[in-house]
Image: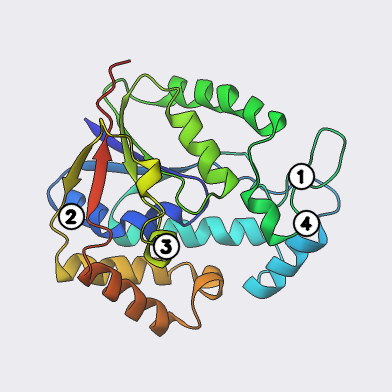
């Protein structure tokens, strides 16, 4: 049996589940992190919005390749294998008519468009063909409402595998009640022991995403303090198992 954590982007699973994953690996369990939106931008011009993000990340040359390297380093710290799929992050994707899908922060949280919904069966089919039959698939809940997170959940819910869910950090820390409406009453909550040693590994793994620290925190030390507070409040210690038979 293998745990497959689905990450919308190159950091989401480690941000959200790094402590649990470290504990699972320490117990000898087989764990992998599969990132869906890990592909390079399409050839040609990128949006002003994406260009501004690259500048903030200080990744002006081959930014996605650099982010994949960060993800590999983070996964190595936690002792897990990784797989990167070819769909570009939504900040690089265009509508069928050629317009960029994302031009400002608020665009990231719009309802799924028919174009995005069409990606769901295609990617679900790809994952189904590559997943081991006995895999436990762990999906983001969609806390925060990012469209790529909601798309990833929609993909996971098409798979015939045993399905689990994780709440996304730091969204759930900043909006504690946001996940309540996303949890089905027939799910089973499972709590893990996440030790101080696991917390330390989790912090170090997140720090590997050097380009992304500024997205959520003022500094790496700020991230470490924030994550420790989340851990003390029992954050990052729970998964939810879906009980629906497929």
Q: How far apart are the alpha carbons under marks 2 and 4?
A: 39 Å
Q: Position of residue 5 (x, y in %)?
A: 36, 42
Furthest residue in direction top, as rendered: 246
Give whichever of discs 2 and 3 has the lower sequence position.
2
Q: Front-most of 55 and 81?
A: 55
Which residue carries the number 1 mark?
A: 42
Q: Quadrant of residue 184?
A: top left
Which residue carries the number 4 mark?
A: 103
Q: Position of residue 75 (x, y in %)?
A: 37, 56
Q: Which label sits on residue 175? A: 3
Q: How far apart are the alpha carbons under marks 2 and 3?
A: 26 Å
Single out the mark in the foreground, 3 or 4. Answer: 3
Callout 3–callout 4 Cβ contact below 8 Å: no
Give whichever of discs 3 and 4 has the lower sequence position.
4
Instruction: Label 1: state its secondary structure.
Output: loop
Q: Which label sits on residue 23? A: 2
Give whichever of discs 1 and 4 has the lower sequence position.
1
Mark 3 burial class by Cα count in 10 Å: few <14, some 14-19, many 20+: few
């Amino acid at each position: 049996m293998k745990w497959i954590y689905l990450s919308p982007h190159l950091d989401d699973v480690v941000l959200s589940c790094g402590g649990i994953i470290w504990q699972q690996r320490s117990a000898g369990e087989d764990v992998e992190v599969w990132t869906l939106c890990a592909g390079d931008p399409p050839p040609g011009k990128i949006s002003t919005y994406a260009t501004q993000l690259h500048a903030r990340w200080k990744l002006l040359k081959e930014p996605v390749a650099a982010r994949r390297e960060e993800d590999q380093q983070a996964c190595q710290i936690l002792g897990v294998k990784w797989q990167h799929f070819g769909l570009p992050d939504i900040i690089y994707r265009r509508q069928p008519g050629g317009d960029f899908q994302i031009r400002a922060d608020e665009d990231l949280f719009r309802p799924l468009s028919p174009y995005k919904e069409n990606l769901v069966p295609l990617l679900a089919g790809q994952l189904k063909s590559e997943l081991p039959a006995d895999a436990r698939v762990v999906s983001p809940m969609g806390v925060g409402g990012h469209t790529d997170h909601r798309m990833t959940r929609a993909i996971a819910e098409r798979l015939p595998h045993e399905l689990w869910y994780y709440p996304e950090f730091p969204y759930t820390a900043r909006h504690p009640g946001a996940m309540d409406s996303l949890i089905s009453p027939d799910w089973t909550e499972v709590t893990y022991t996440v030790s101080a040693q696991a917390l330390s590994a989790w912090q170090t793994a997140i720090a590997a995403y050097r380009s992304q620290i500024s997205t959520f925190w003022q500094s790496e030390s700020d991230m470490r303090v924030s994550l420790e507070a989340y851990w003390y409040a029992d954050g990052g210690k729970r998964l939810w198992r879906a009980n629906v038979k497929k």
